[in-house]
């Protein structure tokens, strides 16, 4: 089976800036894939190459088997992109925007799908309102709707929830999860790593235009050594034997570092010996954010001075 996205040896330079360095990615059909990295690391440039907005200096990129340069019509028809920037036409209503977008792809009688998109993105009551009258969050919903109007098998979301309210985030992810369940391939860039951890089965991390990590979300998190426990104690005093394990203390709770689960019994034993009771205990597992920070720091420390 052909991959949904296939990127081979892609390089991109802007003058003296080497924005992308030998990017190789293969994303199978139906995957929910995360593309993560600090600002300016090349994520949007890579998306622009997939969308045909930017040409790479070398290498190739394909969407559903269609080369984005030599077979650009089919490649663009297979792709829907939600851009990071709020770009909209102020002279049309929401429904008119979606009808015009349908026309770009030669789609006729697309009203039923448009109505479904409006419903699932909670835009139905805004359908006949002019775009310039919408809030920033509503405009972003329309951008999502535009990307989906031609039912692309591959959907790229570039920071889709940046600066938007919780209600929009929840509505968007409900709809995107449904599309992924129905077989659409989703590629997400986000700085909200809790979103990536919850949604993405696999993640690529970029730094300075290079892929520095590529693995399942579960494996990336499991590579973080140890875990931690949060304790509320009575009396509120950590025994001296445990002082070296303390990570932080805030609002009556101690957070202690442990290498693995077997050390928890040692912590409890030290508390019993010191006659300190445990009022509350919670195991804190590592998250994708910790894996991300560790990988970025490791790469930075490996760079030549």
Image (cartoon, rainbow, N blue to C red):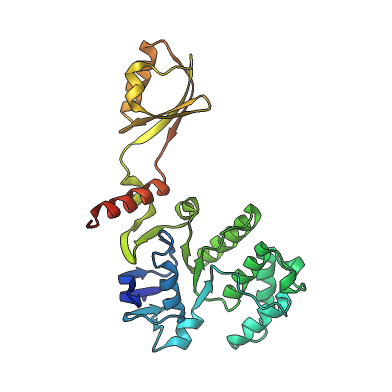
Q: Residue furthest left?
A: 304
Q: Locate the N terminus and report the quarter of the image it occupies.
A: bottom left
Q: Up-down: is 203 above or below 275? A: below
Residue at figure coordinates x 34%, y 53% from the top left? 296
Along the line of sight, the residue nearer the viewer: 174 or 247: 247
Residue at figure coordinates x 61%, y 55% from the top left? 170
Q: In which quarter of the image is residue 92?
A: bottom right
Residue 210's x, y, as percent?
31, 65
User: Is 41 situated left or right of 123 in this image?
Assistant: left
User: Is 182 situated left or right of 124 in this image?
Assistant: left
Q: Can residue 32 be seen in this view?
A: yes
Residue 137's x, y, as percent?
65, 62
Residue 6's x, y, as percent?
35, 74
Residue at figure coordinates x 60%, y 86% from the top left? 104
Along the line of sight, the residue nearer the viewer: 166 or 26: 166
Q: Locate the C terminus and report the quarter of the image it occupies.
A: bottom left
Residue 171's x, y, as percent?
63, 58
Q: Can residue 3 be seen in this view?
A: no
Circle count = 0
């Amino acid at each position: 089976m052909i991959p949904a996205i296939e990127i081979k040896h892609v390089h991109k330079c802007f003058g003296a800036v080497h924005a992308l360095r030998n990017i190789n990615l293969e994303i199978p059909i139906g995957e929910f894939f995360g593309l993560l990295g600090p600002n300016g690391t090349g994520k949007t440039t890579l998306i622009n190459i997939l969308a045909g907005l930017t040409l790479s200096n070398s290498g190739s990129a394909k969407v559903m088997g269609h080369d984005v340069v030599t077979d650009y019509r089919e490649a663009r028809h297979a792709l829907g992109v939600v851009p990071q920037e709020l770009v909209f036409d102020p002279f049309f209503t929401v429904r008119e925007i979606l009808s015009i977008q349908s026309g770009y792809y030669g789609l006729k009688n697309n009203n039923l799908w448009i109505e479904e998109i409006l419903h699932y993105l909670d835009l139905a009551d805004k359908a006949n309102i002019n775009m310039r009258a919408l809030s920033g969050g509503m405009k972003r919903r329309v951008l999502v709707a535009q990307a989906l109007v031609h039912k692309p098998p591959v959907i790229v979301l570039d920071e889709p929830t940046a600066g938007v309210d919780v209600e929009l985030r929840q509505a968007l992810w409900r709809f995107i999860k449904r599309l992924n369940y129905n077989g659409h391939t989703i590629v997400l860039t986000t700085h909200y790593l809790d979103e990536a951890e919850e949604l993405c089965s696999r993640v690529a991390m970029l730094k300075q235009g290079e892929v520095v990590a590529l693995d399942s979300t579960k494996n990336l998190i499991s590579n973080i050594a140890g875990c931690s426990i949060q304790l509320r104690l009575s009396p509120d005093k950590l025994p001296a034997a445990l002082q070296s394990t303390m990570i932080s203390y805030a609002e009556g709770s101690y957070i202690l570092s442990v290498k693995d689960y077997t050390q928890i019994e040692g912590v409890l034993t030290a508390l019993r010996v010191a006659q300190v009771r445990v009022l509350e205990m919670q195991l804190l597992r590592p998250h994708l954010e910790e894996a991300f920070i560790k990988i970025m720091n490791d790469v930075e420390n490996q760079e030549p001075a």
